[in-house]
Image: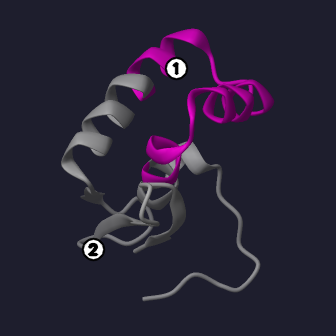
Amino acid sequence: ISVRVGATFALHTRVSGEVALAWFDEDACQTYLDRQQVPADERKKLANKLTRIRKAGYESADSPLIVGAQDVAAPVVDGGNGLLGVLC
């Protein structure tokens, strides 16, 4: 299973992006949501989800692209828990 090179997705619409957002600092996350024009009601739901993801240390969900596939992602962090990348 793969995604074509150069494909783009909004961070808040995919498991790997949600994991990344969960490790963004508050200002960076708000800047992203402002640029994406995410509505207030969706922001509240997303904030709760990002808190849950950060506590769990990973996220998984049914793939929105491939029937029967499960998306799983976890952050790759440095010694200070800063985000280096996302493994998915």
Quarter of the figure with the N terminus = bottom left
Camera-nearest residue between 12 and 56: 56
Colour pattern of the rendering: one colour
Q: Which mark is residue 14?
A: none
Residue 58 at x, y percent in the picture: 27, 57
Q: CA distance from mark 1 to mark 2?
A: 26 Å
Task: In the rendered view, tell whether residue 49 sits above or below residue 11.
Answer: above
Q: Answer above or below: position of 46 versus 1.
A: above
Residue 6: where, in percent of width, then height?
Answer: 76, 78
Q: Is residue 70 left or right of residue 26?
A: left
The stretch drawn in magenta includes residue 41: yes
Secondary structure at badge 2 equals loop
Main SS of residues in magenta: helix
Pick the residue in front: 78 or 57: 78
- For the point 44% across and 15% down, the residue is 44
Badge 1 is on which residue?
43
Badge 2: few (under 14), some or many (20 or more) residues near its Cα, within 10 Å? few
Which residue lies at the image location 27% right of the left edge and 74% below the top edge? 69
Residue 30 lies in magenta, yes or no? yes
Q: Which residue is mark 2?
A: 69
Quadrant of the rendered image containing residue 29? top right
Residue at 50%, 11% (x, y): give it. 41
Q: Please indicate whether residue 41 sits to the left or right of residue 69 in the image.
A: right
Q: Nearer the viewer, mark 1 or mark 2?
A: 1
Q: Position of residue 75 (x, y in %)?
A: 40, 63
- Mark count: 2
Q: Which amino acid, by three-letter code, is at mark 1?
A: Arg
Residue drawn at the location 71% of the way across and 73% of the way down: 7
Task: Tell me where residue 4 appears, x and y as whole percent.
Answer: 66, 85
Magenta region: 19-46
- Point out the tag, 1 or 2, that comes first from the N-terminus: 1
Q: Label 2 sits on what residue type?
A: Ala
